[in-house]
Amino acid sequence: MLPAPKAYMIHGFLGVGKTTFAKRLEKEQAAVRFTHDEWMVRFYGNDPPAEHFQEYARRVFETMEEVWTRCLDLGINVILDFGFWSQAEREYVQSLISRHGGKAVLYRLDCPEDVTWNWIEQRNKQAGSLYIAPATYRMLRARFEPLRRDEACIDVGTHQTPEAIAMTASSTQDHRMNGVDCANYADWRNVRFPPTFANSGPTVKSQF
């Protein structure tokens, strides 16, 4: 019997180097990477209208879900570069992975907030990058739910810069995680995209 395909879940807040790590990991693990921001840009451009952003984001997640779950069905490893900011989202995706015959592997990326913010400030200056204002950063930070103690994970690059995080991909080891039954997709989606998000503070074009 062939081994179960793996779904590598990348958990972390803004500016901790998730996509940098995911790009390295896809080469190390021969996996297909799914990064939400890249799909949003491909379908809706660099600056989709704020009033439509949440709906566009939902559509992208639903489209990606159809593809990455099909990859698992075919025995292909995937990397889910989604951030997984809420427990509800993590439980939903873990359950989905299990139902499609995969094995979830959760990576946690973290670094001190001053390092994170310095990295975001540098990225803000780069042409074509998502701009995140200080007020937006604080507002989104309040929505972030760290992993619970009972959520098995692999810690990557704690207290490191995103560049250093990328270098650790080949040295990590898999930890087994079991799928957890959770609320339905509609309930999870409401957590991921709260209806009041658009009016809760400065606009940001991505939280992934």
Image (spheres, helix red, strand yellow):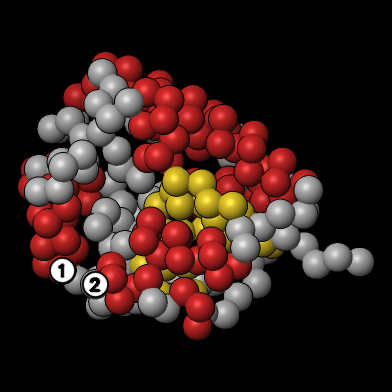
Q: What amino acid is found at the position of numbered circle 1 in the picture? A: Val
Q: Label 2: which residue?
A: 161
Look at 58% across and 48% down and name the residue there: 93
Image coordinates for residue 198, horizontal then vertical, percent: 24, 25
Of residues 205 and 98, the one drawn nearer to the viewer in this rendering? 205
Secondary structure under the numbered disc 1 in the rendered image = helix
Query: Does residue 129 lie above or below 123 as drawn?
Result: above
Q: How many marks?
A: 2
Q: Nearer the viewer, residue 160 or 151?
A: 160
Q: Residues within 10 Å of mark 1 (few under 14, many from 20)?
A: some
User: Quick one: label 1 or label 2, which is nearer the N terminus?
Assistant: 1
Residue at the spot x=45%, y=60% of the render?
A: 22
Assign the C terminus to one quadrant of the image. Answer: top left
Of residue 133 and residue 77, the one placed in the foreground of this image is 77
Looking at the picture, how far across and down is residue 83, in whole percent? 40, 52
**Which residue is labeled 1 in the image?**
115
Structural distance between the alpha carbons of marks 1 and 2: 7 Å
Question: Viewed as shown, does residue 122 lie left or right of 184?
Answer: left
Residue shown at 32%/26% (left/top)? 45
Residue 58 visible in the snapshot: no
| Position of 170 relative to 146 (above/below) | below
Residue most extreme to the right: 1
The answer to whether the residues at label 1 and label 2 have Cβ atoms under 8 Å apart is: yes
Residue 71 location (% of width, % of height): 70, 46
